[in-house]
Image: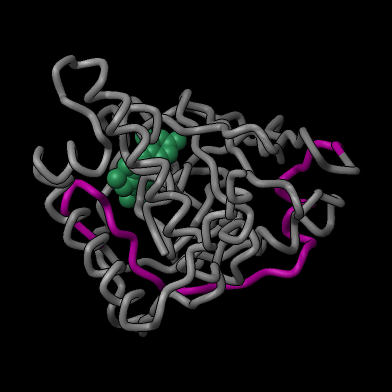
Amino acid sequence: MTEPKQRPPRLRLEPAQQTQLINIQRRSFLRAGLTIGAMSMLTGCNLESDDAVDKALWAMSRWNDRVQAWLFSGQRLAPTYDLAKVTNPFPFNAFYPEYNVPEVDLSTYRLGVSGRVRDKQPWTLENLRTLPQRTDITRLICVEGWSAIGQWGGVPLRTFLEHIGADTTAKFVGFKCADKYYSSLDMPTALHPQTLLALDFGQVALPPDYGYPLRVRVPTKLGFKNPKHIVELFVTNDYPGGYWEDQGYNWFSGS
Ligand SMILES: Nc1nc2c(c(=O)[nH]1)N[C@H]1C(S)=C(S)[C@@H](COP(=O)(O)O)O[C@H]1N2
Ligand SMILES: [Mo]
């Protein structure tokens, strides 16, 4: 007779182990990866073909996403700063030079809404301004090695999602941009109190460089998870990825 198969224990760590795991995450993040030896041990991959290495790296990155989502409640606040700390001039960054910033016709602009939501009416900027607003002075951190403090104001994404009857038990909120950029957030981050559909930057309407007419501002995530010039928002259970995420940047990339 064989023993009945035991279910594996659930991932449950002591606080000290949690700290250790966070430190490992930080270190491996800072070094942009593990050593080849550690990687082959962790993945059981002999690293003999590029394809196997690629698969192992993707599997590890997705594992990181799951562990990080589990470790962080999604409700810890990002640090905020005084007005005097605001970075001026604020850096511009995109996957193209500044002179290629997309042109958006403000008179016909609408934010499209799709997926798992009750009300799929598109939104004008005026309508978005009728919803409750919030302003935070926070730090944007780019994976390329710079950071800057700015002031963003707009509608908390949570308020918006509740207003349109979004299925907040769904896994992801995805965004499409006017410049072919795209990105997505896990639902806990989308519902985080500091995650904004930002209309304002430094108390004026978002200028073109910084993502007019509407951008996502999420201070608990790296810069590339803050899509600018958004034209569509969708709620889904199908992993939507992102412009940089699909090129290998860790999807969670935050806290
Ligand atoms: N639409 C769009 N959004 C984008 C990007 C982009 O290329 N296109 N770049 C991302 C990256 S990598 C960073 S660091 C921030 C930079 O925002 P900033 O120009 O306001 O500094 O925007 C993010 N959002
Ligand atoms: Mo970035």
Point 25% across, 29% down: residue: 97
Please give the name of the residue rendered at 64% of the width and 32% of the height, measured from the top-left corner.
Answer: 238
Residue 151 drawn at (x, y percent): 43, 68
Q: Position of residue 127 (x, y in %)?
A: 79, 51
Q: Nearer the viewer, residue 34 or 244?
A: 34
Q: Is residue 62 left or right of residue 160?
A: left
Position in image of residue 131 (x %, y %): 78, 63
Question: Is residue 98 or residue 76 the one in the foreground?
Answer: 76
Residue 204: x and y in percent read 51, 61
Q: How is the image coloured?
A: one colour
Quarter holding the C terminus? bottom left
Does residue 114 sit above or below 185 in this rendering?
above
Q: Quadrant of residue 81?
A: bottom left
**Do we see residue 46 in this rendering?**
yes
Is 123 colored magenta in this rendering? Answer: yes
From where the camera sits, is residue 209 visible?
A: no
State left or right for residue 221 relative to residue 88. right
Q: Is residue 1 above or below residue 147?
A: above
Residue at image coords 64%, 44%: 173
Vertical placement of residue 199 versus 107, above or below: below
Q: Is residue 92 magenta?
A: no
Q: Residue at x 48, y 77 (%)?
A: 77
Task: Work out whether residue 144 or residue 18 is closer to the camera in this orientation and state it.
Answer: 18
Magenta part of the protein: which range?
Answer: 120-147
Can you tell me which quadrant of the image ligand 2 is in?
A: top left
Q: Is residue 206 left or right of residue 170?
A: left
**How many discs appear?**
0
Q: Is residue 101 left or right of residue 114?
A: left
Q: Quadrant of the N terminus?
A: top right
Q: Could you say which quadrant of the image residue 137 lies in? A: bottom left
